[in-house]
Image (tube, coloured by chain):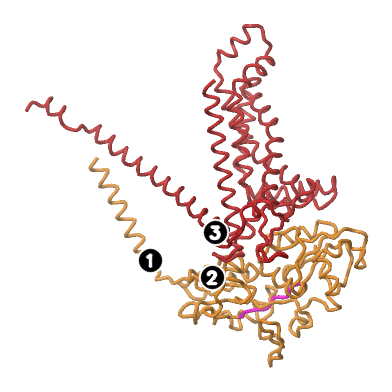
Amino acid sequence: MKKRILLVAALLLSLVTLTACQSSADRGESITVVGSSALQPLVEAAGEQYGSEHLGKFINVQGGGSGTGLSQIQEGAVAIGNSDMYAEEKRGIKAKQLVDHRVAVVGITPVLNKKIGVKNLSFAQLKAIFTGQVTNWREVGGPNLPIVIVNRAQGSGTRVTFEKWVLRGAQAKQAQEQESTGMVRQIVATTPGAISYMAFSYVDKTVAAVNVAGVAPTDQNVTTNKWQIWSYEHMYTNGQPKGLTKDFIRYIYSDAIQEKMLPKLGYIPVNHMQIERDLKGNVTATKGG
Amino acid sequence: MDPIRESLLKVSHQAKLERRGRIIGLFCISLIVIVVAAIFYFVASRGLATFYHDKINLWDFLTKQAWNPGTKDSHGNPAVGALPMIVGSFLVTIFAAIVATPFAIGAAIFMTEISPRRGMQILKPVTELLVGIPSVVYGFIGLTVVVPVIRQLFGGTGFGILAGTMVLFVMILPTVTSMSVDALQAVPRYYREASLALGATRWQTIYKVVLRSATPGLLTAVVFGMARAFGEALAVQMVIGNAALLPHNLVSPASTLTSILTMGIGNTIMGSLENNALWSLALILLLMSLVFNLLIRLIGRKGAMK
């Protein structure tokens, strides 16, 4: 009996010393970044690269959605909260105490099932489709096929952006919702008559992106604001960033990330933008680009 | 003092051991109870905030059909009608149970009454294998196989109650089957012997004696399956379409409590109405699992009285 107690005590002791050793050995520093799934691939890749260049520094990246990112950063639970929308646009967020870092721009395009064959839609037509006034592709110059709307989840950053610039305050029709863009793409690719929307980087051969009001969904058109459906990708910090957080955000702004990694992953660097758009949608020209 | 007297008066080693065991057991149980109580408290406090803090009418919440917590309806009230999700959850659960029960009981009869040896050697491992498959795999198969097939056969998008039922049916089948097997095995051997001795055929014995006396156990198995179906989130979410609309047929997109919950929770802010409304859905889920539990107990007690 005594022996056993001794054994257990020894085990516990060694555990404690081991964990103590570990923490004193790496002297690791780490921060957690949470939020927008649209920005997640970029931050993940950048965090990994950062970690390999700076030994002992770790960037933990988690998804969860823009809402999670904003609420977690507001509560101070994480170092950085990622969001597709301005903090001011989300109800329940006290945006004043948050500092916005706009690290990238993402264009969002409507996508159709390939068999529909419609190449161009006007803003009015898009709005009519997503509010449910038009329910057949015949009415917008397509085949006689019912329109199947596939939405992202309510509050998703992609959806908020799309509805902000297409519906302009109108109420969207209640329709299918999917949690992730990958899922949306698969459903649009396989369901006849399906329409949805997604970031440029997710568009591939299985779905057809359409021109809106004669403008093609290209990065070039986003930088001049000819293509209006786009959003900044925000990294919010609670107060001015310090230490590793500051260092990591500066790293994201570095040329290695902005010029090399962003285009590869389908984002547009902020300094390529020839215009700037504020919270209310006012557009001003910038010297960049 | 003589040693015998001493050892009788002293607390023995065994008694000490027992007391220690009891303390550890009590500690573990109270820990579990605290955890359960904490979960109940947390979900209830968040879920009830919709009604107390945001002043939503409970009746409206349960019976209205418009679910769009971020926006207001024509009267200025937030659109939080959970009826589509409640109906969706119940429909997939009940349909899945209806489809699964005959298969499960049939398999259980085969394994216990008709061919115990082969049944136990082949069928049992197979059904147990089904338990181990993660739900995301079921969902993925549903998405890539079941949904297109339904679309081909019935038109529409293929997403809906029917697809959800098909996926859930396979998911709860092993649970219901293995519990049915236990129920049938619990029927005393002499019931069967007496029945056969009276000249009943094997089918008559199974139908009139074994199944009858195992009814409470079988019902428990079905309710267990239903509880699992009701709480399943991921696989259903992948195939049901997630439209907060009342399903007007089996192949129109619908939603369940779980699917709306998992989709929405990441995009809402703690403490906002959108978030509280989701917690209210979670509260309904919790209460329903409580109901299922009570039902199982009730059936068990009824069965025991026989």
Membership of A39 in magenta stretch: no
Residue highlighted by disc 1: A23
Chain hosting mark 3:
B
The answer to whether marks 2 and 3 mark residues whose Cβ atoms lie closer than 8 Å is: no
Residue highlighted by disc 3: B52
Looking at the rendered structure, the secondary structure element under dot 3 is: helix
Q: Which amino acid, by three-letter code, is at mark 1?
A: Ser
Task: Point out the image quarter for the N terminus of chain B.
Answer: top left
Q: Residue B119 appears at what percent x and percent y?
A: 64, 26
Q: Between marks 3 and 1, how big is the CA–CA gap?
A: 46 Å
Task: Point out the image quarter for the C terminus of chain B.
Answer: top right
Q: Which amino acid, by three-letter code, is at mark 2?
A: Val
Chain hosting mark 2:
A
Of labels 2 and 3, the one closer to you: 3
Colour red belongs to chain: B
Q: Between marks 2 and 3, how big is the CA–CA gap?
A: 34 Å
Question: Is there one chain holding both mark 2 and mark 1?
Answer: yes
Chain hosting mark 1:
A
Colour orange belongs to chain: A
Residue B218 in the figure: left or right of residue A219: left
Q: Between marks 2 and 1, how big is the CA–CA gap?
A: 21 Å
Q: Residue A267 appears at what percent x and percent y?
A: 68, 76
Q: Magenta residues, as a range?
A: A102-108
Mark number, residue A277: none
Residue highlighted by disc 2: A33
